[in-house]
Amino acid sequence: MSNPLIVKAESQVDRLLSQLSLEQKVGQMTQITITSLLETDQQGKALRPFRIKRPEYLSRYQIGSVLNTPQDDITVREWRDLVSSLQELSSQGKTKIPILYGIDSIHGANYVYGATLFPQPIAQAASWNRELVHKIAQISASETRAAGIPWNFSPSLDIARNPLWPRHWETFGEDVQLASEMGKATVKGYQGESLHGPQQAAACLKHFVGYGAPLSGKDRTPAWIPERQLREIFLPPFQAAIEAGTASIMVNSGQINGIPVHSDPYLLTEVLRGEMGFKGVVLSDWKDIQYLHEYHRVAKNQEDAVKMAIEAGIDMSMVPDDLSFYEKLLSLVRSGQISEARIDESVKRILNMKFQLGLFKQTMFEESHYLSFGSEERAEVSRQAVRESITLLKNEGDILPLPKNARILLTGMAAHAQHILNGGWTHSWQNDNLSVATPRKKTILTAVSEMIGDDLVSYSLGTNFDTNLSTHEAVSLAGEADYVVVCLGEKPYTEFYGNIDNLSLPEAQLRLVEALAETGKPIIAVMVQGRPRLFSRIEPLLDGIIYAYLPGDEGAEVIAETLFGFCNPGGKLPFSYPKHPHNLLPYDHVFADTQSPFGHVYEGPLYPFGFGLSYTSFAYSNLKLSTAKLRQGQELKIRVQVKNTGERAGTEVVQLYLHDKIASIAPALRKLKDFQKIYLEAGEEKTVHFSLTEKDLSFVGRDYKWITETGAFEVMLGDLSEQFEFCG
Ligand code: BGC
């Protein structure tokens, strides 16, 4: 039976569409950045109070959408005034179609001053906690909508297959299953049951598809992805999030196998619409239609570029500066090179999204819906997310937690820098405006000092990202301390600003640790970074390693809690941590990746995918499968007992891996199939249940179709494994 609400929206959309002129339709397909609409200073920053310099874009050209932030510290009130004035102008147009404002709220409403800022997505994935990630998305949507913005360019479902890539931390990691689960939880959290409400925002999956695997590791550079991998690794998280109801998808700016995705009808129409059943809006990324000519060099000129992109299946162009796309598209339709029917398809999807969001009824909800904006209660959700994501990589001789009466030297670039905890997409795109920060948030230094008292804490910066500044001073202060806590990492970046040629942590930071180690004092590293920078050279010098990812505004407090044992870290790596610069294999590699035919065994990563210690210990026992011979249509029931064998409560992520022993396509040594996060008091034991069906045993075969083959499989849970046979 068809849903009466959808049918009603469809007929309203059809009616409205029939009243639109071609110009108005093409306007709806145009998205412009806010700074192009406002009066700006010489650096392109909008002048305050905001003044619209191109009202005709809204009232006459009826552009469909506006994006981005005009400044770094815009309050809810300013946002609401700004968005209202845009809506007011577009309602002066003939057709009164509301504007769809879109923004990147990737770890909370990071462009709305005072909003709750959460750990970045890579850290959220390290929590392996679907409910928590769902809650984060709900709050992010609410605080974005509070500002009058109903569209969020998130989540990023790129599978991070190249650790050099500067957008590694915007993803949920390297694994298909984990990213799919986190993606679904995020989309459902943003969108709720229906988009039509004060707490909801439309999701936009990014960046369809294959963006996370550039060969060079640099942003927007080409990827080479065999069809089989595309289908087995890169498409499934998008499929899962489409089934969860995402309203929109943004396209990958790069090329796959030589074809820029923005020009590819195979991926954007045949696969995305035809096979995957996506019915929502497909948005280009920033200037990417223009780049088909200027950067990728597949289009002869700008008109050709627009034609290619529209024929490929794009509905809306993030132009974003001017009316060039509008003009070119109009002339292509007028000259008969693109049919008006093709334009109608896209405009229908855009109008439908506006209807689903309820924008025709109400573009702004009362402020009274948002009384919890940036509240302490929400900061506590963010702190919980940090507690669940922080990953303990090393704890030699149980050096951690540290005694509360110990003298601590804090050093390193991340020790006293709040913006480093957040990374990019925070207040500004690059988070490079140090005069803007959420009020009253701590640095690791201030949090530790508050926790154990100023008199026990000394501090020296040591280095910045890549330059020695006061290593000598740090070493001399280490002499008077009982423990050294060295906070290493990266400064904020995103996209091409974060491109690197060398994954290693810079020499200055490595040398700081080496110099500190000479004092003989125990050293704990706190690592605050967006991608796994190599540090194998100094790893043996470290007694403890707390991996914090980019934990956000509440990170410092929880790092202090973790150092002194007020919280027991529960995170597990959502990626493999490489040991050597030229061994960057993901965890789901095949046997032939691990050794030569002559028996030479290659070294694995420094820390494997899914790894993370705790201040307690867990033991797995009694792994039982419901049958040793699984038949088609049956369910394999699996159970295992997990016991907290240590002396304090803790959480464990029970990870279910499967290994297909022999298959017609060389099988991965292990593939994550499911996971559950459990909490156990000291001494407590729980039985954890999973089930697998034939679908979970399938893979993309030689003809690029999903198949299941009969034969032996191995189920792995903790250090246990059991075999069964699939008999068909
Ligand atoms: C990024 C997208 C982002 C868009 C709008 C682009 O440069 O690649 O991820 O959503 O800008 O801010």
Image (cartoon, rainbow, N blue to C red):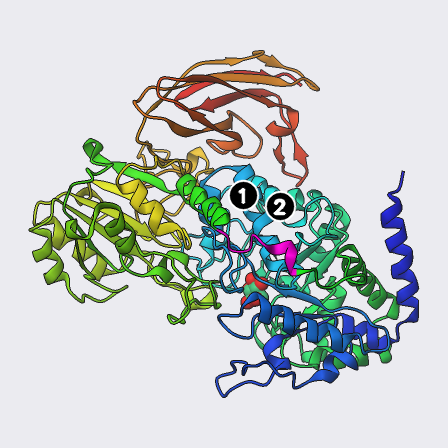
- For the residue pair 370 and 490, the one nearer the viewer reads as 370
In magenta segment, residue 226: no
The Cα–Cα distance between marks 1 and 2, rounded to whole angstroms, is 8 Å
Task: Tell me which residue sits at (73%, 72%) in the image.
Answer: 87
Which residue is identified by label 1? 133
Which residue is identified by label 2? 189
- For the residue pair 690 and 416, the one nearer the viewer reads as 416
Q: What residue type is labelled 2?
A: Gly
Whether residue 250 is visible, yes or no, is no
Q: Which residue lies furthest to the bottom in this view?
A: 42
Q: Tell me whether the residue at label 1 lies in contact with that at label 2, contact meaning CB atoms closer than 8 angstroms.
A: yes
Q: Can you tell me which quadrant of the image ligand 1 is in?
A: bottom right
The segment highlighted magenta reads: 367-375
Q: What residue type is labelled 1?
A: Val
Figure check: 107 above or below 81: above
Earlier-in-chain disc, 1 versus 2:
1
- Label 2: state its secondary structure: helix
